[in-house]
Image (cartoon, rainbow, N blue to C red):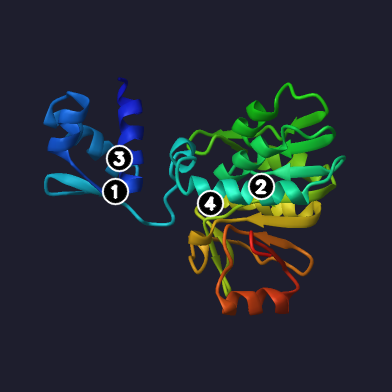
Amino acid sequence: MLAIERKNEILSILQKEQRVLVSELSKRYDVTDETIRRDLEKLEQEGFVKRTYGGAVLNKNHDVDMPLRIREKTNRDEKQIIAGLVRSLVEEGDRIMLDASSTSLMIAKELKEMKKLIVITNSVEVLIELAGHDGIQVISTGGNLNETSLSLVGNAAQKVLNGYHVDKAVFSCKGLDMEAGMTDSNELDSDIKNAMSACADTAILAVDSSKFDKVSFVKTMQLKSGDILVTDRAPSRDWKTYLEEKGIRLVTPAE
């Protein structure tokens, strides 16, 4: 197994169990304790973990971007529910934008059976997922590659987005708060989502329930009247009241 594959597996374990032990990992991967310590040291340098005596714990800092391969495995059932709900909001012939979130990748999988659709995306994974499907025209933003999120970002990507007008823009975020609004971990991803929202008749925020009442590093935007919030389960009564007052449509399995 390559070192990068082992590190990603360790991150997946941490996502589930929150902590790991050097002794257990060395037996699992049949490598020395020193090899595992070097893996954990590298993960700590990248901001993903905090080393402890004999092991490490997951860094729960919301400003840290987990690799897309790891995020795909996190809250997978919830994201699948959200993807199905978003699919019900997309009509044949729509022009949509999809961001590079793991939730958008799930949504792309749900859209593959549509007969007529235009999708503009900054996600390398979404491009691959939708490639070759008759009736679905896929447009890439181009731009600088973010290797962690497999997203295309920067001025070039924003310039392409600004050249289009779409029916719906679908994106996710790291945190959602009544006062701070949508927040993300870095400015480049935040700028892309702002650009997508500005190009769309309707913005659709697709976010699992774990993101509510969380604030990350970069303020992105506030949803506006007429926008849609899609989540996997009904939020609190305070959130329902807040969304109703703002004119934001709430879509959950129960709605």
Q: Quadrant of the C terminus?
A: bottom right
Of marks 4 and 3, which one's residue comes earlier in the chain? 3
Q: CA distance from mark 1 to mark 3?
A: 16 Å
Answer with the quarter of the image where residue 234 lies.
bottom right
List the residue tagged with mark 2. Answer: 84
Residue tagged by mark 4?
Answer: 78
Please tell me whether mark 4 sits on a helix, a strand or a loop. helix
For label 2, the SS is helix
Q: Is residue 50 above or below residue 12?
A: below
Label 4 packing within 10 angstroms: few (<14), some (14-19), many (20+): some
Q: Is residue 153 visible?
A: no
User: Could you tell me the amino acid type at mark 2?
Assistant: Gly
- Position in image of residue 64 (x %, y %): 42, 50
Callout 1: SS:
helix
Q: Earlier in the sequence, mark 1 or mark 4?
A: 1
Query: Which mark, residue 43?
Result: 3
Q: Amino acid at mark 3?
A: Leu
Give x and y (percent) for residue 245.
Answer: 71, 79
Left or right: 151 with respect to 165?
Answer: left
Q: How many marks?
A: 4
Pick the residue in front: 84 or 23: 84
Q: Upstream in the sequence, badge 2 or badge 4? A: 4
Which residue is rendered at x = 16% and y = 30% of the image? 26
What amino acid is at disc 4? Glu
For marks 1 and 4, give the CA distance: 18 Å
The one nearer the camera, 45 or 208, is 208
Q: Residues within 10 Å of mark 3 (few under 14, many from 20)?
A: many
Q: Are dots 4 and 3 in contact, CB under 8 Å?
A: no
Marker disc for residue 17: 1
